[in-house]
Amino acid sequence: MIELQRCTDQQIWDDYVLENGGHPLQLWGWGQVKAAHGWTADRMLAYDDHDQIVAATQILTRKMPLPLRAFSYVPRGPVGQQGSDATFLDAIADYVKRTYKSVTLSVEPDVTEFQTPADWKQSTNTILPASTIILDLEKSDSDLLAAMVKKTRQYIRKSAAEGITIKPVRTKEDLEKCMAVYHQTSKRAQFMLHDDQYYYDVFTLLGDHSPVFAAYIDDQPIAFLWLAISTDTAFELYGGMNGQGQELRANYALKWHAIRKMKEWGLTRYDLGGLINDSVSNFKRGWSDSEVLLAGTFEKPLSSAYSLWDKGLPAAKKVYRKIKSLRK
């Protein structure tokens, strides 16, 4: 038996996530970011008969058009030894059904194998892609380089020789310069961005768990790479480069710097943030000779309106597509 309780203490929450191999998207600060931009964040702890925490999950809920009411989502969780147990999963599903009348609870665990509980189903309504590249940071630099395609190794060396300076972004003023690069990238590649305040909130609310590195020429950023990190895992959130950054292949030297820095900090996994069959994904594939397929997306229907959600109610899918396009 487990007892489910809401956690309202950031220290208790983050300590548990960090001590139990949790993903950075399960950290308190990520929930704060989402809560400031249209979501509701609930942090749920499961206690056993000995009053020990055995599982935790941060649940994000967003209002949806009637008759769906709400959509609840667990990004790269739950966390803990009983996080994948049917008893815990059903308990959090019951919680969002009672509290928000959610049409479904969607869970995207940070694992490669997941046993689907009764009354749950694997879903094609994904937010984060299951396919990704995860580098093993316990390998040596030479082994990591050996697993890359030849062109990636060449461009790492070439870009490192271009007089680029790479350093962490520590102030809002420096971040604003990176955001200018990001807007150029968005316009060139034709993808949507959140409003700038969203990114400033990530920078502030995740704090030390969200390092940003930038490549500079003449003290001006030409490329940046933004991560979310926990004790074990680095997860790429955002990145971009301007025309000069493209010309100098600055993203190669920059990413290799970030990978080596994560190794130096003692992290063991570097997740390149998912593959979606675009030019960026092709770039990512050059960094490893193998891809990782995570277990995927699992849903528990919680409402008689679930069939409308599942089959693509136009108004609901419009909201869902916007959620997905801005998934980070």
Image: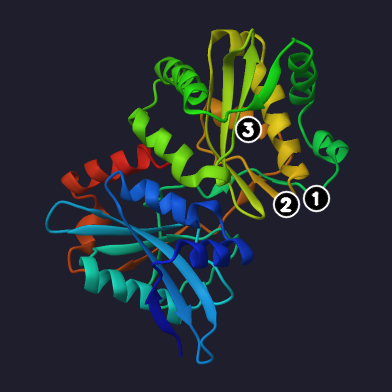
Kindly give the residue lying farthest to the left in the view shown.
Answer: 66
Which picture quadrant has residue 271?
top right
* Dots 1, 2 in contact, CB < 8 A: yes
State whether residue 130 appears in this view.
Answer: yes
* Residue in the image at 80% along x and 39% along y: 144
Which amino acid, mark 3?
A: Lys
Disc 3 vs disc 1: which is toward the camera?
1
Which amino acid, mark 1?
A: Glu
Q: Which mark is residue 115?
A: none
* 223 to the left or right of 72: right
Q: Which mark is residue 284?
A: 3
* Residue in the image at 71% along x and 50% along y: 267
Which amino acid, mark 2?
A: Thr
- Count the marks: 3
Callout 1 secondary element:
loop
Which comes sooner in the sequence, label 2 or label 3? 2
Task: Decide: few, some or many residues near mark 2? Use Cα within 10 Å; few <14, some 14-19, many ≥20.
Answer: some
Q: Which mark is residue 268?
A: 2
Callout 2 secondary element:
loop
* Residue in the image at 24% along x and 56% along y: 309
Q: Which quarter of the rendering shows the C terminus?
A: top left
- Measured in 3D between alpha carbons, the distance from the residue under mark 2 to the one under mark 3, in whole angstroms, is 18 Å
Nearer to the camera, 278 or 326: 326
Nearer to the camera, 279 or 172: 172
- Measured in 3D between alpha carbons, the distance from the residue under mark 1 to the one under mark 2, in whole angstroms, is 6 Å
Please provide percent x and percent y for residue 321. 30, 41
Callout 3 secondary element:
helix
Q: Which mark is residue 138?
A: 1
Relative to 251, does residue 132 appear above or below in the rendering? below
Task: Decide: few, some or many residues near mark 1? Use Cα within 10 Å; few <14, some 14-19, many ≥20.
Answer: few
